[in-house]
Amino acid sequence: MFRKMSLALAATLMIAGAAWADPIEGNWKTQAGSTAAIAGSDSFSITLKSGKYAGKTIGSFKAAGDNKYTGTITDPETDKTYSGKATLSGASLKMSGCVLGGLICKSQTWHKL
C-alpha cells in the first residue's frame, strides 16, 4: 500500500513540476531585434516572425530537463546549422550555437515579449 502511495505521489510531483516549468513557447525578442516564435510540445521549432529573415525556421530543440533544451540552431544569414543549447531563466532565454563538440560557441540572450 505504501509503495503505491509513493508512486502516486512521485507521479503527481513530476506532473506539477512540468506545469511549474518556465514556458519556452511564445514570442521572443532576439539580440538582433527580430521577433522569434517558439512553438511545440515535445520538440520546439523556432521561426523568425519579423526582420530581414521573417518566415525562416532557424531552430529545433527538445527539452533536456531543468529548463534546458538541446537541438540545432541555424544562422539565418549564412544558412549554417550548429549544435544548439538553450537555457530558460524567467523571461530570458540564453541561446548558444556551437561547433567542434562545444569547443567554440557563440551565445546571445533573448527576452520574452
Image: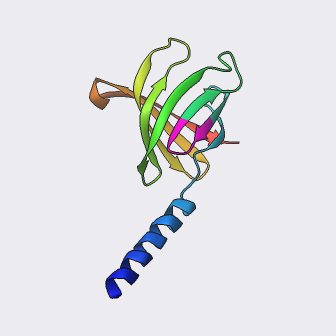
Q: Which residues are magenta?
A: 38-44
Q: Is residue 23 above or below residue 4?
A: above
Front in this rendered view, residue 92 or 69: 69
**The C terminus lies in which quarter of the figure?**
top right
Location of residue 35 in the rendering, given as x and y in whole percent from the top left corner = 68, 30
The residue under the point 69% across, 27% down is: 49
The extreme bottom residue here reads 1
Tell me, yes or no, whether the highlighted magenta stretch contains residue 100. Answer: no
> Residue at the location (70% across, 20% down)?
51
Left or right: residue 110 versus residue 106 is right
The answer to whether residue 11 is visible is yes
Q: Position of residue 18 (x, y in %)?
A: 51, 60
Q: Considering depth in this image, is 34 or 62 the residue closer to the camera?
A: 62
Left/right placement of residue 22 relative to residue 103 reads right
Q: Residue 44, how many percent across, how many down?
A: 53, 38
- In this rendering, would 105 be left or right of 58? left
- Specify whether 47 is left or right of 81: right
Answer above or below: position of 4 versus 76: below
Displayed quadrant of residue 50:
top right
Quarter holding residue 105: top left
Which image quarter holds the N terminus?
Answer: bottom left
> Magenta part mainly helix, strand or loop?
strand
Q: Indicate the quadrant where residue 20 lies.
A: bottom right
Q: Is residue 31 visible?
A: no
